[in-house]
Amino acid sequence: TRQSHTTAVSLPCGSGWRVFLCSILGASSYGREGMGTLISLWLGLAVAAAIGLGATWYLRRVRLPREETAEGIAALSDMRWRDFIKLVLDVLAARGFVRVNDPEATSDEADIPLQRDGETWLLSSRHGASYVLGSDDIAEFANTMRLRSAQGGLLATPGTFAPAARRLAESERIELLDGPGLWPGLRERLPEAQRNAIGTQARMRARQHAWFGWLLGVIAGALVFLLAHGNGNDAAFP
């Protein structure tokens, strides 16, 4: 008759970690198989918690600001050009730029002359988050600056700039103001209700990703438990 390989290991519930184990299992002695199951369980829980908490930290510290920026850029692109450029002018005023009346302006989308420290700057904008401005746009704006005798330029858009555009802008003394760069300064200038709506939408998106992170943690923890428990049984019964 085959003898059982399970050997009872007496663990008196005296103090320390033994008390903790006893409180969970409700017993003062454990078999090797029971101890293996307990260790596998705690390994699985530790893995699940580590992945879930890590995902939550990443989403709150990294992903949530990105989601809010994306929602904010979308809100900026939905504005009328007049409202968008007013916000940009408010930000530039805080940096010392002063708007100059331009008798040559014939439309709302005319380039806007500014002054700072005795120099003339020209502000232009391309309104829309879908814009990806390239070197041709920079060259065209640089020509307009020369015609208007501007010493520097500011090109604003809720969209983005191509790498070639950024390189050319540096040589032409043009400061590029894209959506991600503009949003932190424009955010506090939006109406409170609009800021709250943008924040709520961003948090909803981040929360959806957080649940997904915890789901992955639970799946990974379950796999670790099964693998560790299986290996423990194999070792106990060669």
Image (tube, rainbow, N blue to C red):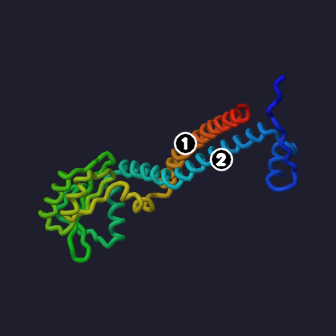
Viewer-side residue, 202 vs 91: 202
Q: Residue furthest top?
A: 1
Label 1 sits on a secondary structure element that is helix
Q: Is residue 147 left or right of residue 62?
A: left
Identify the residue at image location x=22%, y=67%: 121
Q: Identify the disc placed on residue 46.
A: 2
Say which residue label 1 marks. 208
Label 2 sits on a secondary structure element that is helix
The kind of residue tagged 1 is: Gln
Q: Is residue 13 left or right of residue 124?
A: right
Dot 1 alpha-carbon crowd within 10 angstroms: few under 14, some 14 to 19, many 20 or more: few
Q: Position of residue 125 (x, y in %)?
A: 26, 56
Count of numbered marks: 2
Q: Position of residue 45 (x, y in %)?
A: 67, 44
Q: Position of residue 111 (x, y in %)?
A: 22, 59
Identify the residue at image location x=84%, y=22%: 1
Q: Identify the disc placed on residue 160.
A: none
Pick whichever of labels 2 and 1 is earlier in the sequence: 2
Viewer-side residue, 166 vs 238: 238
Viewer-side residue, 219 vs 57: 219
Dot 2 alpha-carbon crowd within 10 angstroms: few under 14, some 14 to 19, many 20 or more: some
> Between marks 2 and 1, how big is the CA–CA gap?
22 Å
Viewer-side residue, 68 vs 216: 216
Residue 7 falls in image quadrant: top right
Q: Are marks 2 and 1 in contact (CB under 8 Å)?
A: no
Q: Is residue 25 left or right of residue 232?
A: right
The kind of residue tagged 2 is: Ala
Can I make out residue 236 in this image?
Answer: yes
